[in-house]
Amino acid sequence: MKFIFIIFILPTACLALCDYPHNPPAVCLSGIITSSSRPQKTKLPCLYKVKLGHLIRPGQTYHYNDKLELVTYPKAQKLEQKIIALYSKGPCLKTRQKIRTLAIYNCSDWYAEIPDLALIDNGAIEASVRDPWKGPKTFFDCDAILKKFESKK
C-alpha cells in the first residue's frame, strides 16, 4: 500500500500551484499594441508589447499573504503598470491597433516555455476563469469592468 502511495499520490502532491498576484488569475486590459513579434520556442504564435490604457484586477478576487491570511479584493482595482508583454493564442494583430481583452496569468504547467505569471490573451472580452485554489470557475465581463473605469476619466 505504501508503494502505491509513493508512486501515485506523492508526485501530484509535489506539484506546486503558482503563487498568483490574485485568484482567479485574470485581469482586464485595454491599450494599444506598440509592437508584435513571433516568440521563439513556444506554441503561442504572437507576443505583443502593449501600452496600457487600463489594467484592472476584477472584483471578488483574493490572495493569501505571507502569513497565509486571506486578503480579499471585493471591488475592481486599477493596477499601475504602463506597458506589458502579452502572449496571444491567435495570429498577430497590427501595431497601433487597439486591444481590449481578458488576460490570464501563465503557470508553468500550462505553457512551460514562457515565464510564470506572463500574461496570455484569453481571446475574448468575457470568459469564465478557473480558480486553482478553490476549483470553480468565475465569470468575468471585462467589457463592463473596463467601461466603468473608462467613464471615470
Image (spheres, helix red, strand yellow):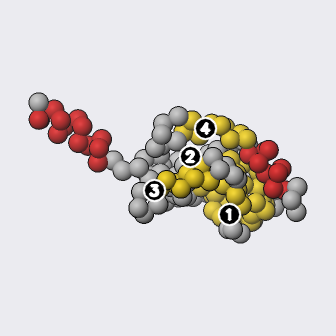
- The CA span between labels 3 and 4 is 21 Å
Is 11 positioned to the left or the right of 34 in the image?
A: left
Q: Earlier in the sequence, mark 2 or mark 3?
A: 2
Give the amino acid type for the residue marked by disc 4 in the picture. Thr
The residue drawn where x is 76% and y is 56% is 30
Q: Earlier in the sequence, mark 2 or mark 4?
A: 2
Where residue 58 sits in the image (x, y, percent)?
A: 67, 50
Q: Nearer the viewer, residue 150 or 98?
A: 150
Is 123 positioned to the left or the right of 39 in the image?
A: right
The residue drawn where x is 29% and y is 44% is 13
Judged from the image, the secondary structure of the residue bearing numbered disc 2 is loop
Q: Are marks 1 and 2 in contact (CB under 8 Å)?
A: no
Q: Which residue position holds label 3?
A: 69
Q: Earlier in the sequence, mark 4 or mark 1?
A: 1
Q: Quadrant of residue 80?
A: bottom right
- The CA span between labels 3 and 1 is 22 Å
Q: Quadrant of the N terminus?
A: top left
Where residue 111 sits in the image (x, y, percent)?
A: 48, 49
Q: Which residue position holds label 2?
A: 24
Considering every residue shown, the one lying at the far top of the view is 1
Q: Quadrant of residue 83?
A: bottom right
Judged from the image, the secondary structure of the residue bearing numbered disc 3 is loop
Can residue 36 be seen here? Answer: no
Give the amino acid type for the residue marked by disc 3 in the picture. Glu
Q: Earlier in the sequence, mark 1 or mark 2?
A: 2
Q: Are marks 3 and 4 in contact (CB under 8 Å)?
A: no
- The CA span between labels 2 and 4 is 7 Å
Q: Which mark is residue 79?
A: 1
